[in-house]
């Protein structure tokens, strides 16, 4: 009887010791905010240059114009390096009216699209790129406003940005995706590591 009681007490003590650790992990996961995600994206997109900022949030134009905003706009300055936010395969390497760069994330079946860069850098359709790799130079190609980089997430394997009708969004809110790929992967701490920059070639 005494042995059983000792075992029960030991088990109860073990549970009491483990519970705070589990709670801490759960709270930590829940504490990730939209601002945290934006800061992480800026850190990777502009290679830790603190001058970058969010110029328009997802759907941020809804009160300014009839068409909705399908992505997140980031800005830092003309000609600044723009880096890949995910590992993936290039499905569009620029050259169109918006200099569209598209990178497919096969694991999550999503495509991340970058618009308005002045040129792409040493990438071609079919290439595999890594997080932190320079893929373009910031610009304003096809944009009505200032220099910035539009980043959009689309379902499936895509080559172009989506087109929204008035008051209708084609894309889901992207923050759940960005939280998953930027904060939940084991190699997250290496996500913003600078990769060697290959010789550049531009597509105009």
Image (tube, rainbow, N blue to C red):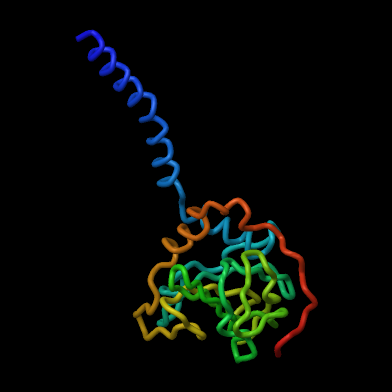
Residue that lies at the very extreme toward the top in this rendered image: 2
Residue 143 appears in the rendering? no
Picture quarter containing residue 195? bottom right
**Residue 34 against residue 100 in the figure, above or below:** above
Picture quarter containing residue 95? bottom right
In the displayed structure image, the side of residue 76 where residue 39 appears, left or right: left
Query: Which of the image's four quarters has the C terminus?
Result: bottom right
Measured as percent of width and height from the top left, residue 15 is found at: 33, 26
Measured as percent of width and height from the top left, residue 189 is found at: 60, 51
Residue 65 appears in the rendering? yes
Query: Which of the image's four quarters has the N terminus?
Result: top left
Q: Nearer the viewer, residue 65 or 53?
A: 53
Residue that lies at the very extreme toward the right in this rendered image: 199
Q: Nearer the viewer, residue 118 or 77?
A: 118
Measured as percent of width and height from the top left, residue 82 is found at: 67, 71
Residue located 42% across and 32% down the image: 21
């Amino acid at each position: 009887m005494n042995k059983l009681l000792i075992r029960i007490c030991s088990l109860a003590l073990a549970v009491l010791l483990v519970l705070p650790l589990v709670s801490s992990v759960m709270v930590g996961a829940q504490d990730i905010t939209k601002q945290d995600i934006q800061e992480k994206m800026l850190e990777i997109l502009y290679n830790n240059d603190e001058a970058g900022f969010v110029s328009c949030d997802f759907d941020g134009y809804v009160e300014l114009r009839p068409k909705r905003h399908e992505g997140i706009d980031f800005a830092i300055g003309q000609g600044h390096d723009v880096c890949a936010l995910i590992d993936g395969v290039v499905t569009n390497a620029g050259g169109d009216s918006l200099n569209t760069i598209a990178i497919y994330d096969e694991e999550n079946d999503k495509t991340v699209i970058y618009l308005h860069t002045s040129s792409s850098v040493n990438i071609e359709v079919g290439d595999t790129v890594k997080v932190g790799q320079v893929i373009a130079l910031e610009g304003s190609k096809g944009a009505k406003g200032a220099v910035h980089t539009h980043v959009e997430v689309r379902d499936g394997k895509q080559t172009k940005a989506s087109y929204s009708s008035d008051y209708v969004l084609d894309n889901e809110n992207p923050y759940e995706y960005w939280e998953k790929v930027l904060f939940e992967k084991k190699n997250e701490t290496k996500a913003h590591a600078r990769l060697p920059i290959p010789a550049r070639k531009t597509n105009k």
